Image (tube, rainbow, N blue to C red):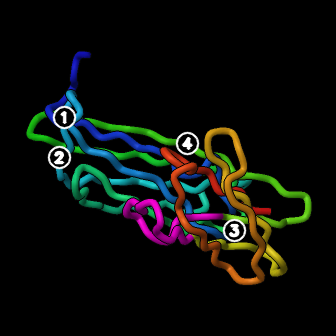
Amino acid sequence: KIANAPVEVRLIAQEQSIEPGFDFSFLVVTETPSGVPQDREVELTITFRGDEGVLEEINDKVRTQGGEILAQYKVPEKALSANVEARLQEGDHVSTAYLNVLSSYSPTASFLHLSRAQTDEVPVGGEVVVEATTTHGGTLFWEVLAAGRVRAVGATSGRRINFTATYDMLPKIRVVGY
């Protein structure tokens, strides 16, 4: 790999699509070309576009800790896409990264967004908490998937999904809500 800068910036989308009125989050990663995390200040330009062009443009600076930071921005109503540019200046060297995420579509204007309430790892036997944001109230049904199997199921009338982490959920899970 030929590096353009001694420290590079990357962007990783946390969602596959944006949802108007909800938070759009992405991970900003700063590391050496060999993958060693570096704490740096990164300039961000987030542009939300709609049918009529640019709805909102946000210029921000974030500082990574341990080589990463989760950035979150509210998606304006009627947004169809979010474009993110990250710029990291190291002396004469500049590293840039780009991210483009399109909006999701729902004929009933119903959306459900799930996100982890805590950011640290949960040990086996520990409680996993998932926050649910939705456009409509009602019962939220959920499933925990791991290794191609359903490991836990439940329903809640609230906006929090709580379950205990078990060995059969290792090494990674996916929580599905509907």
Mark 1 lies on a secondary structure that is loop
Callouts 1 and 3 close, C-beta under 8 Å = no
Element under disc 2:
loop
Residue that label 4 marks? 100
| Quadrant, the N terminus | top left
Which residue is label 1 attached to?
A: 32
> What type of secondary structure mainly makes up the magenta span?
loop
Marked residue nearer the N-terminal end (4 or 1): 1
Residue 76 x/y as whole percent: 63, 67
Q: Tags 2 and 1 in contact by the CB under 8 Å rule?
A: yes
Distance between the alpha carbons at the discs numbered 2 and 1 = 7 Å
Q: In this view, does 159 lie to the left or right of 38?
A: right
Where residue 161 appears, x then y in whole percent? 64, 73
User: Which mark sits nearer the N-terminus, 2 or 1?
Assistant: 1
Residue 123 in the figure: left or right of residue 51: left
Between 123 and 24, the residue placed more toward the observer is 123
Label pair 4/1, CB-CB below 8 angstroms = no
- Where does residue 147 sit, x and y in percent of width and height? 62, 39
> What's the amino acid at mark 2?
Gln
Amino acid type shown at disc 4: Asn
Foreground label between 4 and 1: 1
Whole-angstrom CA distance, mark 1 to mark 3, is 38 Å
* Residue that label 2 marks: 38
CA neighbours of label 2 inside 10 A, class few (<14), some (14 to 19), many (20+): some
Q: Which of marks 4 and 2 is nearer the N terminus?
A: 2
Q: Is residue 23 left or right of residue 159?
A: left
Of the image marks 3 and 2, the number of the one nearer the N terminus: 2
Q: Which residue sits at x=83%, y=77%? A: 139
**From what the image shows, is residue 71 above or below residue 90?**
below
**In the image, which disc is placed on residue 77?**
3
Q: In the depicted view, which residue is nearer to us: 68 or 170?
A: 170
Secondary element at tag 4: strand
